[in-house]
Image: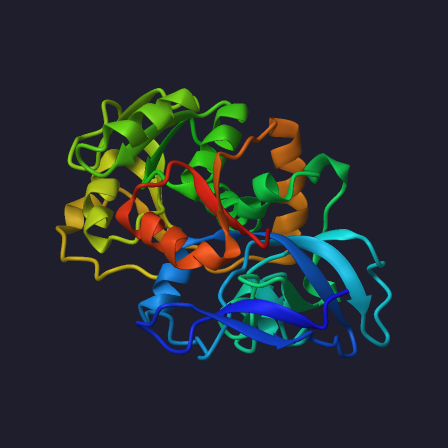
Amino acid sequence: MPDDTLVMLLPHAHSALIPTRRPLPVPRIGQVRVRVEACGVCRTDLHLLDGELPQARYPVVPGHEIVGIVEALGPATHRLTLGMRVGIPWLGHTCGHCFFCSHGRENLCDLAEFTGCMRDGGYATHVLAEADYCIGLDTRWSDPVATAPLLCAGLIGWRALRAAGTCQRLGIFGFGAAAHIVTQIARWQGCQVYAFTRPGDLDSQAFARSLGACWAGGSDQAAPASLDAAILFAPVGALVPPALASVRKGGRVVCAGIHMSDIPAFPYCLLWGERQLVSVANLTRDDAASFFDAASRAGVRTHVRRFRLQDANLALAELRTGHLQGAAALTPE
C-alpha cells in the first residue's frame, strides 16, 4: 500500500489544476478511505474552476462522480466493509435535523457539504468520504469508468426527469453527459425525446438520435411538436424563453444546472397558461437508490472518454469546448 496519494489540486478559481503529493489520508469517525478507480468529469467542475460556486472552499480537489474500493474504515464505521465498491456523489454531508432533512429534502439542507467543492473530491488516487453518504455498488456496476458519470450526470438527470412529471414529449436542451443518460431512461419510460444542441452541432444531434431521440436540432430551431416538458442542462439563461415557448399550456420547464447565466426578460405570455418554471438542486440519497434501480432496468449504457488523472486539465478543456460526446472520466492508471 502506498504511503501517499496523488491529487489534482485547484489552488483557487481561474487556476490550472496542479499535481500534488500528500500523505495518505486517515479516516476519522464515520469515514472511509476509498481507493479511486475512476472519477467523472462534470460541468460543475468547470463552474468550480470559473469561481461561479459561492459555496466553494479553495484550495480544493475537484471531482464528485467517484467510483472506488473501500480501503480503510474509520472508528465506528459499520455500514460499509473493506473491499466494497462504492460511489461517492456530490452530496457529502447534511445536518440531519433541519426542516429540509426532516422532510425528505436533504438536498436543500443549509449545512450540506458537497464533494469536490467544499471537501476534497475524486481527482485523486484516494479520497475520504462519510460512509453514510456513499452508495454501495453491486455487481451490475462492475465497470468503474462506465459507472462514474452516473454519480452526478445520472443522478441530477434523474431528479430533473422526475421533476418534469409525466410526459409523452420531452425536450432536452444541452446534449452532454446528463442528457445522454436521461434520454435512455426517458425512452425506456416511453417518452419521445426532442434534443436541442448548440446550433450547427451536427455530431451531437446525430449522437442524440443514436440514443433514441425522435428529433434533434439546434437550440435556435423550434420544436416540431408541442412538448409536455423540457429540461435545461445547458447553463445558458437565454434558453429559458425558447424552452417555455416549446411547451404546451400546463407544461413545465426544469432548470437542472447548479449555475446558469442570467435569464433575460421575456413576455408573460410564455409563462401564462399555467406553464411552470422550476429548478432542481443537488440530490438526495433516496435519489441514488431509485436512480440506480431505474438505470439497471433501463439498461443504461454510458459513453465515456477516458483520461489519465494527470491529464485532468486536458479533460476539462475538452469538456469546455464541447468536444466530448457523452461523458469523460479520469483514472489513476
The residue positioned 45% from the left and 25% from the top of the image is: 191
Residue 95 placement (x, y as % from top left): 64, 76
| Front position in the image: 64 or 270 | 64
The residue positioned 16% from the left and 45% from the top of the image is: 269
Q: Is residue 179 left or right of residue 234?
A: right
Q: Is residue 265 above or below residue 141?
A: below
Residue 148 placement (x, y as % from top left): 57, 47
The residue positioned 56% from the left and 78% from the top of the image is: 111
Quarter residue 164 falls in: top left
| Colour style of the rendered protein structure | rainbow
Residue 280 placement (x, y as % from top left): 44, 55
Number of disc labels = 0
Q: Is residue 183 left or right of residue 120?
A: left
Q: Is residue 158 visible?
A: yes
Quarter residue 301 falls in: top right
The residue positioned 23% from the left and 23% from the top of the image is: 224
| Front position in the image: 35 or 136 | 35
For the N terminus, the quadrant is bottom right
Q: Is residue 277 above or below residue 324?
A: below
Q: Is residue 80 left or right of residue 63?
A: right
| Front position in the image: 71 or 100 | 71
Quarter residue 93 falls in: bottom right
Residue 321 placement (x, y as % from top left): 27, 48
Q: Is residue 257 visible?
A: no
